[in-house]
């Protein structure tokens, strides 16, 4: 057994749904998120962090294993039967071997049964429906936590439902549609503004809950020896964002406040980083050795103010959402290359997006056929709206990123090279069933 690192910090990992980078700290000045903005003032803000997938279960499974979805097995949604491959080791399991005690409070989306994910404690059965309920439960657990000298270091995961659709007015007070920020990848009209105004209401409630949670963390855990991470699973639930491999689909909030004892100054990091980097980071801060099978790299050098690789290329994947829709992407600071493995429309909208107010006002241009290859020059086109694949001036760039993507797929054994993984079989009552009762001995004499 590895020895516990003497100065191993407590780690609180907070993750929410479908937020993307829709926060004031990322330049969306009208988004009601003052508490997270205050937290970011003392944190390292990653401006170019990305999920490994643009969908809930695959994104979270990659975050908690350090392996791409096709490697860990969760290529689609957990409630559609997708689950980890045999032998996959999760973050709480890796940290347990380094002396940590792990707790899950609130939402998870890796498996229909949260107790199989390797946590020492699961509160709320892995799903509490609203942010303030989750924060209340987390607060109770933190206030009951013994002094640091009397316990193991803590790995606390807090999962929040918000800001997943729907955003009904009876649950979330909408903003004034005239004041919202409309990103360039969406049409600016009354329908989109109505939708974003409702979204802002959900963000406001999330931010209020985060303010309460962050205060409780600082009251119960020592900031000198505590790392706090706030992130989301993937992009926001709007057309050309969630369920796509564009920046708006995989781009995520990533705010990390290192232990105060590190004396690490707050800063912004523009290098491309991945959710796959969080598992190596956790191992690093816990005193573990790098695991060769993990795909990411520790963020500790960046958190301490050094390191970085401005030339780094990361990869992302989508295979299943409502149906089979395979695509892969290679991304750097300068370019994004997307390969579509199956004919279809430019955008495949999930049902919640198809029924959204934004959809009512966007027309049908997204139903045009998709190209096999897409390339975006992020230096000129940060929203990735102009496909330059096929343009002679970008021929070498397209070929280079296509080659890098091929190499990654071969290296990771991506099943898409052979047509893709089949959907998982239906669950059965025989799986994990309790043993049958022994046969009763009907020849035994009756009780008196």
Image: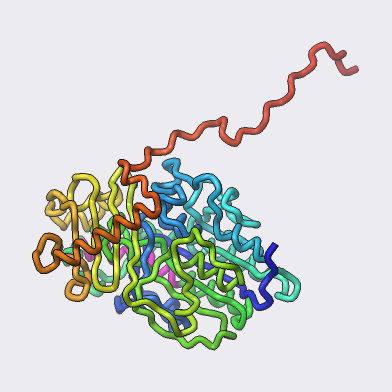
Q: Is residue 73 visible?
A: yes
- As drawn, the residue found furthest toward the top would be 443
The residue shown at (58%, 67%) is 289
Is residue 166 something one can see in this rendering? no
Return the x and y of residue 68 as percentages of the image width and height: 41, 56
Q: What is the span of residues highlighted in magenta in the rendered image?
A: 192-207
Q: Is residue 68 above or below residue 445?
A: below
Assign the magenta stretch its main secondary structure: helix
How was this image coloured?
rainbow
The C terminus - image quarter: top right
Numbered-mark total: 0
Residue 309 in the magenta stretch? The answer is no
Residue at image coords 35%, 57%: 408
207 displayed left or right of 263: left
Specify the quadrant of the image occupied by residue 155.
bottom right
Q: Nearer the viewer, residue 170 or 370?
A: 370
Q: Position of residue 14 (x, y in %)?
A: 50, 67
Which quadrant of the figure contains the N terminus?
Answer: bottom right
Quadrant for residue 151, please give it: bottom right
Nearest the eye: 204 or 328 = 328
Furthest residue to the left? 392
**Residue 197 highlighted magenta (yes or no):** yes
Residue 187's place in the image compared with 23, above or below, is above
Residue 433 x/y as whole percent: 61, 33
Q: Residue 178: x, y in percent?
A: 22, 72
Q: Which residue ends up furthest to the right in the rendered image?
A: 448
């Amino acid at each position: 057994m590895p020895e516990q690192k003497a100065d191993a910090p407590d780690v609180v990992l907070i993750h929410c749904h479908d937020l993307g980078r829709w926060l004031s700290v990322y330049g969306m000045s009208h988004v009601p998120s003052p508490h997270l903005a205050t937290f970011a003032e003392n944190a390292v803000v990653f401006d170019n962090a990305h999920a490994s997938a643009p969908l809930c279960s695959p994104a979270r499974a990659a975050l908690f294993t350090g392996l791409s979805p096709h490697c860990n097995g969760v290529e689609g949604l957990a409630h559609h039967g997708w689950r980890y491959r045999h032998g996959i080791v999760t973050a709480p399991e890796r940290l347990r071997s380094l002396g940590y005690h792990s707790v899950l409070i609130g939402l998870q989306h890796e498996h229909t049964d949260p107790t199989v994910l390797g946590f020492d404690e699961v509160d709320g059965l892995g799903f509490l429906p609203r942010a303030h309920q989750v924060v209340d439960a987390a607060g109770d657990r933190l206030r009951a936590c013994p002094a640091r000298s009397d316990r193991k270091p803590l790995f606390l995961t807090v999962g929040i439902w918000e800001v997943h659709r729907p955003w009904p007015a009876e649950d979330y007070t909408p903003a004034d549609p005239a004041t919202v920020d409309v990103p360039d990848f969406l049409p600016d009209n009354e329908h989109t503004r109505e939708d974003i105004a409702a979204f802002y209401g959900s963000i406001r409630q999330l931010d209020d809950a985060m303010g309460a949670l962050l205060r409780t963390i600082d009251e119960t855990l020592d900031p000198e020896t505590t790392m706090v991470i706030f992130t989301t699973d993937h992009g926001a639930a709007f057309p050309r964002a969630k369920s796509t491999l564009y920046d708006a689909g995989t781009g995520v909030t990533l705010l990390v406040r290192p232990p105060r004892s590190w004396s690490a100054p707050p800063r912004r990091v523009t290098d491309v980083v991945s959710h796959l980097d969080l598992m190596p980071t956790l191992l690093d801060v816990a005193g573990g050795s790098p695991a060769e099978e993990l795909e990411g790299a520790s963020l500790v050098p960046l958190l301490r103010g050094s390191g970085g690789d401005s030339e780094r290329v990361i990869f992302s994947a989508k295979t299943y959402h409502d149906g089979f829709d395979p695509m892969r992407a290679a991304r750097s600071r300068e370019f994004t290359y997307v390969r579509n493995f199956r004919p279809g429309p430019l955008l495949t909208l999930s049902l919640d997006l198809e029924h959204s107010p934004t959809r009512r006002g966007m027309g049908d241009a997204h139903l045009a056929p998709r190209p096999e290859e897409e390339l975006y020059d992020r230096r000129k086109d940060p929203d990735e709206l102009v496909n330059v694949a096929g343009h002679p001036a970008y021929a070498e760039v397209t070929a280079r990123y296509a080659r890098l993507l091929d190499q990654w797929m071969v290296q990771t054994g991506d099943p898409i090279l052979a047509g893709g993984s089949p959907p998982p079989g239906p669950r059965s009552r025989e799986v994990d069933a309790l043993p049958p009762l022994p046969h009763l001995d009907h020849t035994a004499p009756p009780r008196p």
